[in-house]
Amino acid sequence: SFADLTSGAVTGTIAAVIGHPVGHSLSPNLHNPWLAGAGIEGRYRAVDVPPEVLAGAVPAFRDLGLKGFNVTVPHKTAIIPHLDALAPVARQMGAVNVVAFDEAGKATGYNTDGTGFMAHLKASVPDWPVDRPALVIGAGGAARAAIVGLLGEPLPFVMITNRSRDKAEAIASEIGRGRVTVVDWADRHAAVGGAGLVANTTSLGMKGQPPLELDLAAAAADSVVYDIVYQPLMTDLLTRAEARGLRTVTGLGMLVEQARAAFRIWFGQLPEVPEGQIAELEARFR
Ligand code: ATR
């Protein structure tokens, strides 16, 4: 716990993830083998930080000598006023998922979710279609990350659709740089036909949630369907896409890639992913 860390009951921490709750975080399962593989001493720990003690997290982790920490729900935006500096992408997204301390103890906020989204897509489908717009479903933090990543690519434009249209409009105007158009929620099925990439960034399809209702009948044969949900790994959306012969991208890899990018910020090197590490995680969600 946060108290165990600050009281000195738990020592040897070099990085952490803070959230509330944070017990189910997979990040320690990723980072600890990477630290061992790189020969770096110290552990990566999941630390439950309730909102009322968030203000104390940055000074506490600085004093403990951590290289940095990940930030997850519900702190990704709330952490910003407690930092000394913000990287441009984090500023653009209005959300931070990585904090790094420099030698002087200055805390800078980064966001590697968009990098993770793109890195996993490119690794999974190197020839994903960039000749047509992408269609992003949803307008939460994950949609912002996907859009920031996609806007770095040579796509003609990005379409966004969301049940609450105003949230999609806000994303288009705040981060769209004139290259994001809003598609009405009722028109999302038809929009699939013009898209090279269709990405679900909502929680729909997650275990315990209803599936995403999206008709794939109009999809071109070479289009790619990406679902950031990884519990289960094969969502109803991806199962239906596969049945139509479309290429699919599962969500766990985005989590891995955002974590690799965080590791590089802290330790100056991309971690080697040990043989079998991802398969072992995937097996949990099959
Ligand atoms: P995150 O930050 O993790 O992306 P979020 O901000 O809670 O999560 O966003 C959840 C997304 O899932 C939103 O786009 C939400 O749509 P609304 O903005 O209309 O709420 C979408 N979502 C959740 N449940 C939904 C449902 N039953 N039907 C359609 N969209 C849904």
Image (spheres, rainbow, N blue to C red):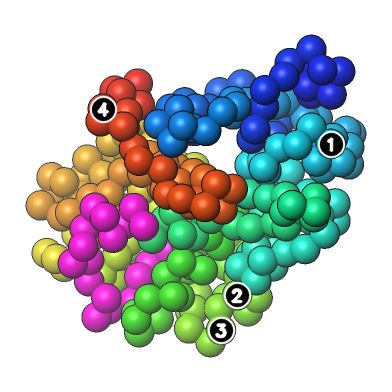
Q: How many marks?
A: 4
Q: Residue at label 2? A: 175
Label 2: state its secondary structure.
Answer: helix
Residues drawn in magenta: 119-137
Q: Quadrant of the N terminus?
A: top right
For the residues bearing labels 3 and 1, Cβ distance under 8 angstroms:
no
Q: Of residues 100 and 255, which is closer to you in this image?
A: 100
Please name the residue shown 73% across and 26% down the image: 48
Mark positioned earlier in the residue sequence (3 or 1): 1
Q: Residue at label 4? A: 276
> At which x and y percent is residue 27?
52, 32
Please name the residue shown 77% across and 63% down the image: 85
Label 3: state its secondary structure.
Answer: loop
> At which x and y percent is residue 242?
16, 46
The amino acid beneath tag 4 is Gly
As measured in the structure, the alpha-carbon distance from the residue carrying label 4 to the one carrying label 1 is 36 Å
Q: Residue at label 3? A: 177
Q: Nearer the viewer, mark 3 or mark 1?
A: 1
As measured in the structure, the alpha-carbon distance from the residue carrying label 2 to the one carrying label 1 is 35 Å
As measured in the structure, the alpha-carbon distance from the residue carrying label 2 to the one carrying label 3 is 6 Å
Q: Nearer the viewer, mark 4 or mark 1?
A: 1
The amino acid beneath tag 1 is Asp
For the residues bearing labels 4 and 2, Cβ distance under 8 angstroms:
no
Q: Dot 2, how many residues are within 10 Å of its Cα: few (below 14), some (14-19), or many (20+)?
A: some
As measured in the structure, the alpha-carbon distance from the residue carrying label 4 to the one carrying label 2 is 37 Å
The amino acid beneath tag 2 is Ile
Q: Residue at label 1? A: 63
